[in-house]
Amino acid sequence: MSGEDAAPGEAEAGDAAGPRPLRTDLAPVVDAVREADAAAFVAVGDRFDDDLRYLTRFSGPDRPYALVVVPDEPVGRAVLCAPALFREQAEREFVAPARDAAADPTEHADTGFHDGVSREVRTESVGDHAGERAAAVVDDLVDGASAAAEGDGPTVLAPASIPHDAAVYLERAGNDLASTDAVAGARAQKTPPEADRLRRVQRAAVAGMARAEAVLAESAVVGAGEDEREADERSGDDRRPPLRWADEPLTTERLRREVNQVLAARGVRDAGNTVIGAGPSAADLHYVGDDPIRPGETVLLDISPRGPDGYYGDVTRTFVVDGDGGWERRAYVAVEAAREAALDEVEPGVPAKTVHGEAAAELAAYGFDPNAGEGEAGFTHGTGHGVGVSLHEGPSLSGAGELRPGHVMTVEPGVYDPEIGGVRLEDLILVTDDGYEILAEYPFGIVPEKRPDAR
């Protein structure tokens, strides 16, 4: 079964062997160095630095290390300054995949990976600061004659997020630092292997959604007992009693645990990103607390797991058990229409803001404020954001620029009322040469159902 045809949560043929190791094309970094008439590119961080993880595919350690890239013939040279205890891992994750691709380009032709950048790992001076080690590598690799003018130090490009102490070491060594957005630009346009990673984790995300929907569909609506009614009268809370599932009251935390079990079984981590709100907390965009789930109130589920290669999924659906067709029904219809209006605009060359504008206009047509501020009733966020090795990265559908093939982003209009709840519908899409692909389909419907692939 092809990636496009696989059902939510279903494994693809060949998954037992696992996908090929990821390799990042460093040619755009080399090009940025040349275009800026600079001498080198330096990135410093640890395994939690998404730029560095993307550039190196090196998944450890939790203390700083550095990458240095310099122009060379025919394309460039890259040196990873790793701690000595991580040398074998660095060789395996940073060097070997690119070397294998270069050795057999025919086998790897489908990846489009031919950057020609030679890679090596250095572990000397491991007691020095990562910025100091990077400065030493720049000094070793860069010809002093490459300086822009006699007496000037070489210009070194770095991401704007480079740690301050690393920047100080590089500048003390005589380098002039300049910021570059080359990494952000490269990250925004996914390669086919990256898109495959995103499909895989997104399928796990929708499998988790199917489990949550099934639990809601199986939940029972119960009447309040005399003691509960008296307690509600004293507290002024006239909401209905919580749903019951598996003989206990259903809460957002119980539902979250059911989702996270499915994610773990499919080899991805919830990463603390299983957001579930019910009633008023459904208007909180990042709610991870514990609320009772009551009939007639919106239940908003936003599931964003992280896969083994660091790529995220992101899917949101909203349900109501035993609703009365009031605010929540009107909001759901409006958000569905806004989602369709946004998707109708998605194709290469379209300004990103156009997609957001169409979604906002559709919500306004249904009577919802399209420019609501935080804590106000209406549409309070952008229509979508890029997803990759960060849950939120470029491009933004509220930002500048045009959509390009390879962009992977969410489309997630929503409306909220802090006193009632919230409705949001979100899918993850890949911009293609002639439109878009939804990376993992999941059905719509405000009334929860038990789907065939739910546990």
Image: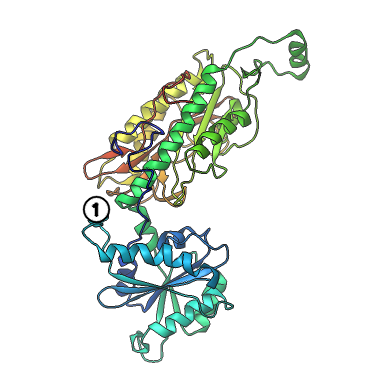
- Circle 1 sits in a helix, a strand or a loop, which is it? helix
Q: Residue 11 in the image: state x and y as whole percent.
A: 38, 37
**197 or 343, which lies in front?**
197
Residue 377, compared with residue 230, is above or below; it is below
**253 or 358, which lies in front?**
253
Q: Is residue 298 left or right of residue 230?
A: left
How many marks can you see?
Answer: 1
Q: Which residue is mark 1?
A: 110
> Residue at horizontal 55%, vertical 68%?
64
**354 or 383, which lies in front?**
383
For the question of whether residue 231 can be seen, the reply is: yes
Q: Is residue 440 left or right of residue 212?
A: left
User: Mark 1 belongs to which amino acid?
Assistant: Asp
> Residue at horizontal 27%, vertical 73%?
75
Q: Residue 339 in the image: state x and y as whole percent.
A: 37, 31
Residue 77, compared with residue 264, is above or below; it is below
Residue 172, compared with residue 409, is above or below; it is below
Within the image, what quadrant is residue 206 found in?
top left
Outermost residue, bottom direction?
151
Neighbour class for label 1 at 10 Å: few (<14), some, many (≥20)?
few
Q: Residue 193 in the image: state x and y as whole percent.
A: 33, 51
**29 or 394, which lies in front?**
29
